[in-house]
């Protein structure tokens, strides 16, 4: 059965562009409850750990530089079928392929600076949420 939590992070380009409020509004209007949220920062090493699965990919070095270039807003979200529904709300990785009206279609600048992260499985949602927040099971 699909889980009811996912993890997201508003990325540095969208925070810097002043789109935190607009994106958060879309998330809440789509029926997601914000369980945990903060404004923080990742060093290049921490960004490297977060994206460890991509470490052999050609974009890894640029990605970790970009992800440590400014503040981010990580959040844990709750909704029925959270992982799949949230991936639908954010759209494809490449904003040129993202469906109209999705967060990436509206706010992403490029395939790298694509405004927002969304976990791709229930297991990764737990791991990624735990990377930024502790004790959220009680919320
Ligand atoms: N990315 C990139 N170039 C690519 C593919 C991905 O810079 O060709 C970046 C982009 O920021 C993306 C992140 O790496 O969101 C993780 O890639 P993934 O394939 O997991 O995409 P996502 O799950 O975020 O849609
Ligand atoms: Mg991914």
Image: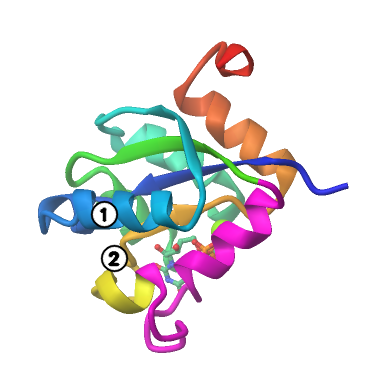
Q: Which of pointers 2 and 1 indicates the residue nearer the eye?
A: 2
Position of the C terminus, as image quadrant, is top right
| Rendered image quadrant of residue 110 | bottom left
| Rendered image quadrant of residue 4 | top right
Q: Is residue 84 above or below residue 43?
A: below
Q: Is residue 73 above or below residue 134?
A: below
- The magenta-colored residue range is 80-103
The residue carrying pointer 1 sits among few (fewer than 14), some (14 to 19) or many (20 or more) residues within 10 Å by Cα, namely: some
Relative image position of residue 66 (x, y in whole percent):
26, 54
Q: How many marks?
A: 2
Report helix, strand or loop for mark 2: loop
Between residue 14 and residue 32, name the one nearer to us: 32
Q: Earlier in the sequence, mark 2 or mark 1?
A: 1
CB atoms of marks 2 and 1 within 8 Å: yes
Residue 14: mark in rendering:
none
Q: Which residue is mark 1?
A: 66
- Ligand 2 falls in which quarter? bottom right
Relative image position of residue 44 (x, y in whole percent):
31, 39
Between residue 77 and residue 118, name the one nearer to us: 77
Q: Which residue is mark 2?
A: 113
Q: Is residue 61 among what the camera can see?
A: no
Look at the numbered disc 2 and say if its residue's Cβ is closer than 8 Å to ligand 1: yes
Q: Is residue 112 among what the camera can see?
A: yes
Relative placement, left or right, of 69 versus 57 is left
Alpha-carbon span between mark 2 and mark 1: 8 Å
Magenta stretch: residue 91 in it?
yes
Relative placement, left or right, of 129 versus 114 is right
Report helix, strand or loop for mark 1: helix
The residue lying at 52 percent from left, 14 percent from top is 134
Relative placement, left or right, of 126 versus 106 is right
The residue lying at 29 percent from left, 71 percent from top is 108
């Amino acid at each position: 059965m699909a889980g009811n939590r996912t993890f997201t992070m508003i990325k540095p380009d969208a925070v810097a562009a002043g789109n935190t409020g607009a994106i958060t509004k879309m998330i809440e209007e789509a029926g997601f409850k914000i369980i945990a949220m903060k404004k923080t920062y990742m060093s290049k090493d921490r960004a490297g750990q977060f994206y460890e699965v991509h470490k052999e990919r050609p974009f890894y070095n640029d990605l970790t530089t970009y992800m440590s270039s400014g503040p981010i807003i990580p959040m844990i979200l709750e909704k029925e079928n959270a992982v799949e529904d949230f991936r639908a709300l954010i759209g494809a990785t490449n904003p040129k392929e993202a469906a109209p009206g999705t967060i990436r279609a509206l706010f992403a600048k490029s395939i790298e600076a694509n405004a927002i992260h969304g976990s791709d499985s229930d297991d990764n949602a737990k791991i990624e949420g735990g990377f930024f927040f502790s004790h959220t099971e009680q919320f």
